[in-house]
């Protein structure tokens, strides 16, 4: 089973995301960007779902640092900020795609499949 690191500081958003992923992927949680960087190294996930607004280190900075050492690891930005500039900034940081919150189950699964295969 493929492993997905869900970098999300909000408990309800994390639980919703894991509910969407259940029976398809194993979920690992990071509560901030710094923890996400550490867990990428120790847990070796197949993909990262990265909240862009988190404490300690935001998702943009964490993504850039993760991609610097793991350039082939897919990172999908997840944020409530759905402006065009937010999507562009996430892609510039190294994200392979962008999901707006609230995340739709179908869109989330399709985006993950596109990034890592079914």
Image (cartoon, helix red, strand yellow):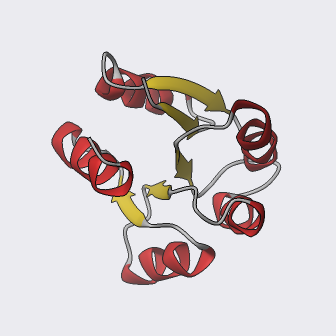
Residue 25 at x, y = what percent?
40, 26
In this rendering, would 77 be left or right of 101?
A: right
Assign the C terminus to one quadrant of the image.
Answer: top left
Residue 2 at x, y = what percent?
45, 30
In this rendering, would 88 be left or right of 23?
A: right
Residue 115 at x, y = what percent?
37, 56
Please determine whether, in this image, residue 97 is positioned above or below residue 78: below
All told, the count of numbered labels is: 0
Nearest the camera: 39 or 33?
39
In this rendering, would 84 be left or right of 44?
A: left
**Residue furthest toward the top?**
23
Please determine whether, in this image, residue 31 is positioned above or below residue 80: above
Residue 34 at x, y = what percent?
81, 47
Please determine whether, in this image, residue 3 is positioned above or below residue 101: above
> Would you identify the image quadrant in which residue 89 lies?
bottom right
> Would you identify the image quadrant in which residue 92 lies?
bottom right
**Residue furthest toward the left?**
106
Q: Which residue sits at x=66%, y=62%?
A: 63
Q: Which residue sits at x=62%, y=55%?
A: 53
Nearest the camera: 30 or 80?
30
Assign the N terminus to one quadrant of the image.
Answer: top left
């Amino acid at each position: 089973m493929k492993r997905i690191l869900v970098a999300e500081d909000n408990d309800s958003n994390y639980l919703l995301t894991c509910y969407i992923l259940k029976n398809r992927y194993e979920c690992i949680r990071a509560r901030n960007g710094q923890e996400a960087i550490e867990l990428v190294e120790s847990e070796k996930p197949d993909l990262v779902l990265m909240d862009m607004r988190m404490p300690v280190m935001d998702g943009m900075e964490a993504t850039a640092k993760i991609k610097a050492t793991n350039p082939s690891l897919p990172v999908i930005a997840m944020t409530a900020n759905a402006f065009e500039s937010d999507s562009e900034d996430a892609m510039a940081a190294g994200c392979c795609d962008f999901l707006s919150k609230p995340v739709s189950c179908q869109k989330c699964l399709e985006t993950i499949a596109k990034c890592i295969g079914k």
